[in-house]
Amino acid sequence: MAIDCGLPSPLGPPAGEKDVKALQFIQEMTHNTDSVQERVLCEILSRNADTEYLRRFQLNGATDRDTFKSKVPVVTYEDLQPDIQRVANGDRSSIFSSHPISEFLTSSGTSAGERKLIPTTGEEMDRRQLLYSLLMPVMNLYMPGLDKGKGLYFLFIKAETKTPGGLVARPVLTSYYKSQQFKNRPYDPYNVYTSPNEAILCPDSFQSMYTQMLCGLIMRHEVLRVGAVFASGLLRAIRFLQLNWQQLALDISAGTLNPKITDPSVKDSMAKILKPDPELADFITKECSGGNWEGIITRIWPNTKYLDVIVTGAMAQYIPTLDYYSGGLPKVCTMYASSECYFGLNLNPICKPSEVSYTIMPNMGYFEFLPHDDSSSPSTLSRDPPPRLVDLADLEVGKYYELVITTYSGLCRYRVGDILQVTGFHNKAPQFRFVRRKNVLLSIDSDKTDEAELQKSIENASVLLKEFKTSVVEYTSFADTKSIPGHYVIYWELLMKDPSNPPTNEVLNQCCLAMEESLNSVYRQGRVADHSIGPLEIRVVKNGTFEELMDYAISRGASINQYKVPRCVSFTPIMELLDSRVVSVHFSPAAPHWTPERRH
Ligand code: AMP
């Protein structure tokens, strides 16, 4: 059935009636970007007109863009925090939204060391579901035959808590996987997973990963795509295979289940899948025992057509490792989303990671853009008068913008913190390269550590050096992702006032832990619950190293007056210089504290 779906160089026709509808919806939304945006804003402002938040700005019933832009301020999470706290404490009045707040989504972005709490409403789940429903119809245009097998996706839930007022607080994907929309999804031959729901929904990360891997191995010939949300998650799964293949092979050989799997619903669901298969166990042993992991994904899952993982933004650091394990399979980044709002999708999924562009769907929220110039980044905006932001349909190709959103759940002109570059248009809808999240210095998984957090953690750790009359005079850092899980490396140059009494090895190890203790809760959760981040490492460098670093920068053209020590490095010659001056290496001896409960 040939329809002009208007998408770039599709290889095949839409895969069915349902896909035709989805593709037509994308076309309709992207042809009418501006009018859809106008309608979305009007809907949001009409329905939320009587909320406490909007009443403060005296829109007096206006729902047009001009009034909205002139009266409602652009805000950050911190501006909204007092009102969000009221909701968290149990205030059920219509503060942000006329619809009741159903739960809080806990963002991987933090504020004062804790995950941001994003209020959401029940119907937002449907909006997210709608965006998900567009992904396979687009993919099917480029990759025919995905209904002939399954997807091996490593999907996990995370811990949830209750706010003092009794609302659930959890990450958006945990909320989604636990929703009826996900659990009771109708059978769709294009979207069959090897993992049973019970394995995905198991709160214990070991049991969940173990059984998802086991299912993936058992159904190895059926697997057509392998994925996780982020590249780091897929690499963690490969690492898990490296560490656990022997036990997995044992289970497959005997048709029994590792006694560490104790969750009753997981055990029940695995009982239906497991059967003794010594031949498969031998195969896995043969592939894994030699210590050669190159191309392991395609060796074990030979029918894999692509990897479905986000490799844009901070995840780009994992591309070479993914290529190593998969023999360079295509890496497909399907969508761009956040706890605050799901934004859009990639209409040209089989492209190089460096060319990935996301098309924001104008029905998802009302989107505005703050022109962004790296040299004069507008970091603080005065509340009065509000700056004139650019609308979705009016963006210019090549320019950089910061994303500002207004959502049905009641966030108004909220700065997400993402910097995007317009790469082109699909119909009237701009397409964006994800450039970066503002202020992120270090990231291994979903953790985001900024310069202030790093500085504070170093100050806290330095307290331990006082009794040795030692201080940290300079430091820099990098995210070491050569081994999985990756870890933070911090280079320290120390000043010892009493060289006869240097800080002991033990104390420097404790400094690593002290740093970890003061990093944000997403980092500590990664260390403790997800095991997605390894122990923090301090490398003490020789005195004078940072001066050499400056000399090097100046020799390459930096101005001596403007030179500032980079607080994060990734440029190979600089890393080589630093590493050649290392005098001692220290690792965190224990995991930092973390519980799902917030510290304040
Ligand atoms: P969270 O609120 O924890 O769901 O994190 C959302 C943030 O993750 C976004 O604001 C982006 O900074 C980042 N993110 C989400 N999707 C992508 C993507 N496709 N590529 C790069 N970064 C992304």
Image (cartoon, rainbow, N blue to C red):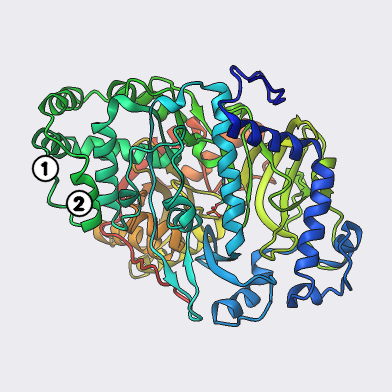
Residue 152: give x, y in percent of width and height: 36, 35
The residue singled out by tag 1 in the image is: 256
Q: Is residue 23 above or below residue 12?
A: below
Give the residue drawn at x 48%, y 78%: 166
Name the element at disc 2: helix
Task: Locate the N terminus and report the quarter of the image it occupies.
Answer: top right
Left or right side of 75 for 62: right
| Figure quadrant of residue 82 | bottom right
Sequence-wise first label, 1 or 2: 1
Q: Position of residue 475 (x, y in %)?
A: 48, 51
**What's the residue at 66%, 81% (across, down)?**
93
Q: Along the line of sight, which residue is nearer the eye, 48 or 434?
A: 48
Q: Residue flagged by tag 2: what amino acid is it?
A: Lys
Q: Are marks 1 and 2 in contact (CB under 8 Å)?
A: no
Q: Residues within 10 Å of mark 2 (few under 14, many from 20)?
A: some
Tell me, yes or no, if residue 263 can be seen here: no
113 horizontally vs 239: left or right? right
Amino acid at the residue labelled 1: Thr
The CA distance from mark 1 to mark 2 is 10 Å
Q: Is residue 506 above or below residue 3?
A: below
Tell me residue 287's x, y (percent). Answer: 20, 23
Q: Residue at x 60, y 38 (%)?
A: 134
- Residue 267's label in the rendered image is 2
Q: Secondary structure at mark 1?
A: loop
Q: Is residue 360 above or below residue 590?
A: above
Q: Is residue 28 visible?
A: yes
Nearest the camera: 10 or 71? 10
Residue 70 horizontal/vertical position (percent): 89, 63
